[in-house]
Image (spheres, helix red, strand yellow):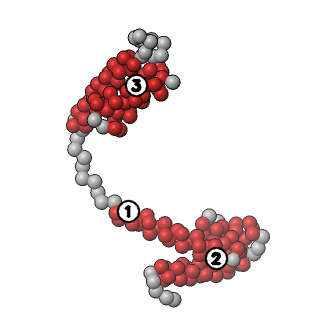
């Protein structure tokens, strides 16, 4: 209710002081926060707290000006920023690696499940062929031959994807 009654007057006073709508909105918000915090000690004159609100608006504005001045002075004491290196090469590499990662995911998804399993265990998780054979319940020689074929298929799929992305045909 207090906000609804006096918001416009407080905002207009803040706007007169700051000449910036954004700053006036901030000051108005702080004034009503202070009104809430100090609701038990606000001065009521002739049944109204508008005087207290407007004086508080002036105080909040002055505090804002002092704070801004101290901030600017602190910035002036900081050393000048050094020349920042050009990160475009790193960004390009990151984008390229993300594209390769996406192509790898897509290629892996098109492989048969058994090839995915072999590649996951032996290449991605670096298990030995003996451990992979035990995990899959197949002979170690079978793991070796499937691994070789899976790597060949994956390589072909990645090469095809690279050719397609470069606009060439295979």
Is the residue 145 above or below the residue 121 in the image? below
Is the residue 72 above or below the residue 85 in the image? above
Q: Is residue 58 left or right of residue 6?
A: left
**Residue plotted at (43% across, 15% down):** 48
- The answer to which of 96 and 152 lies nearer the viewer is 96
- The answer to which of 105 and 48 lies nearer the viewer is 48
- The answer to which of 6 and 84 lies nearer the viewer is 6
State the count of labels: 3
**Residue plotted at (57% across, 80% down):** 157
Residue 57 rendering spot, x and y as whole percentages: 35, 24
Q: In this figure, which residue is indicated by the disc labeled 3?
A: 31
For marks 2 and 1, give the CA distance: 30 Å
**Residue plotted at (46% across, 25% down):** 5
Extreme residue in the front direction:
46
SS for tag 3? helix
| Figure quadrant of residue 16 | top left
Q: In this figure, which residue is indicated by the disc labeled 2?
A: 110
Of tags 1 and 3, which is closer to the observer?
Answer: 3
Residue 113 rendering spot, x and y as whole percentages: 70, 74
Sequence order check: which comes first, mark 2 or mark 1? 1
Q: Is residue 143 visible?
A: no
| Figure quadrant of residue 24 | top left
The answer to whether mark 2 and mark 1 are in CB contact below 8 A is no
Q: In this figure, which residue is indicated by the disc labeled 1?
A: 90
SS for tag 1? helix
Extreme residue in the bottom direction:
170
């Amino acid at each position: 209710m207090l906000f609804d009654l006096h918001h416009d007057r407080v905002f207009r006073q803040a706007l007169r002081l700051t000449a910036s709508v954004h700053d006036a909105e901030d000051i108005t918000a702080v004034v009503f926060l202070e009104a809430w915090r100090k609701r038990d000690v606000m001065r009521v004159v002739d049944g109204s707290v508008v005087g207290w609100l407007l004086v508080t608006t002036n105080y909040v504005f002055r505090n804002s000006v002092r704070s801004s001045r101290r901030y600017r002075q602190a910035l002036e004491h900081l050393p000048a920023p050094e020349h920042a290196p050009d990160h475009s090469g790193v960004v390009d590499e990151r984008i390229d690696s993300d594209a390769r990662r996406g192509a790898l995911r897509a290629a892996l998804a098109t492989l048969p499940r058994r090839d995915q399993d072999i590649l996951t265990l032996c290449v991605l998780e670096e298990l030995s062929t003996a451990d992979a054979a035990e995990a899959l319940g197949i002979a170690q020689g079978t793991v070796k031959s499937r691994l070789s074929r899976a790597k060949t298929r994956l390589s072909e799929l990645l090469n095809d994807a690279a050719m397609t992305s470069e606009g060439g045909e295979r």
